[in-house]
Amino acid sequence: MKKRPDAERIAKQLTAYYGLPLAGHSKQDEDGHDYVELYPEDVHRNDGFCVRLSLGWRSLKGEFVPGSFAAPVIEEMGKAPDEDKAVFSGLVKRMRAERGIVKMQVNGNDVDPAQPETWPSDWKRLALILEKTPLAVNTEDEEDTEKELLHWGGRFLAGILALTPLEDAATEDATNPEDLPEGAKSRIEVNRYERNRFARAACIDIH
C-alpha cells in the first residue's frame, strides 16, 4: 500500500538546507489525493502562510495559501528589496527552465513572476501557483515522490520566503558586555547567519 509523503521529514531536510525553521504536515483531500503543507515554524498559521503541494498522477501543483490575517505579510512582500525580488525571479526562471509553470497574481491581476520591475508596489492580495507535469510522483516509488517534493516544493517555497520579511531577531544579552547601567537592556542579533545562509542556498538553486 502506497504511503503518504512524510511531510515532517521533508520539512526537516529543507530546514537544514535553507537554515530557516519549517514545519510540515501530510494530508488527504476529500477525493483521497495526497498533499503536503509546509510553513514557517515560528509564525502562527493565521498570520503567515503555507505552501500546499498537491500530488496528481505524475504531476505536482504548488500553491501559496495565506492565513486569515496574513494581509500585513503580503503588504510587506510587495515592499521586498530589489535583491530579494531578484532571488525570487531567479528561482522562477530556474523552474521555467526545467519546464515548470509558475503563475502569479497581485491584487487579482496577472503579473509575470520573472519580471519584478513590472509588479505593482501596493500588494493587498497575492496568488502564486506552480505546476509541473510530467513528474515522477504519486507512483509506487515513494523515494522518487519525496525527491521531487524536495526539489520542486523546496524551490517554490524558497521563492516565497525570499519575499517574506524575515527580520533579524533580537534577544536580551544577560552578560551585559557593554557594562550598561543596571536595568538597561543590551540587544543582539541572533539570526543574521540563518538569513544569509538562506540567501546562499537560494543562489545555489538558481545557478
Image (tube, helix red, strand yellow):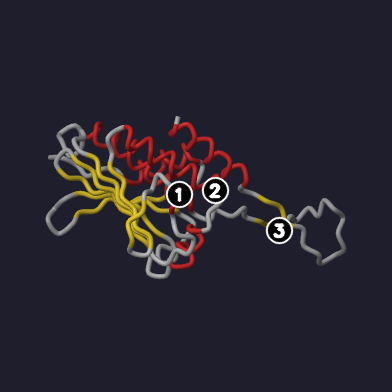
Q: Is residue 53 left or right of residue 30?
A: right
User: Spatial distance from mark 3 to mark 1, Cα to Cα?
Assistant: 37 Å
Q: 207 above or below 83?
A: above
Residue farthest along the bottom direction in this orientation? 69
Q: Quadrant of residue 44?
A: bottom left
Q: Amino acid at mark 3?
A: Glu
Of labels 2 and 3, the one closer to you: 2
Q: Residues within 10 Å of mark 1 (few under 14, many from 20)?
A: some
Which of the two residues, 133 or 189, is positioned nearer the viewer here? 133
Left or right: residue 177 compared with residue 71:
right
Helix, strand or loop at disc 3? strand
Residue located 37% across and 56% down the image: 50
Q: Amino acid at mark 1?
A: Pro
Horizontal relation, residue 172 to residue 9: left or right: right
Q: Would you say the residues marked 2 and 3 are in contact, meaning their CB atoms lie under 8 Å apart?
A: no
Q: Which dot marks residue 96?
A: none
Give the residue pinned by disc 3. Answer: 172
Residue type indicated by callout 2: Asp
Q: Would you name the residue on which mark 1 appears?
A: 116
Upstream in sequence: badge 2 or badge 3: 2
Q: Earlier in the sequence, mark 3 or mark 1?
A: 1
Residue at the disc numbered 2? 82
- Please count the marks in the image: 3
Whole-percent x and y of residue 5? 26, 43
Q: Which corner quadrant holds the N terminus?
A: top left
Instruction: Measure the C-alpha gap from mark 2 to mark 1.
Output: 8 Å
User: In the image, residue 21 lies at what x, y percent?
Assistant: 48, 48
For this rendering, which residue is in front, 14 or 135?
Answer: 135
Categorize mark 2 by other alpha carbons within 10 Å: few (<14), some (14-19), many (20+). few
Q: What percent of the width, then of the height, locates residue 91?
A: 41, 39
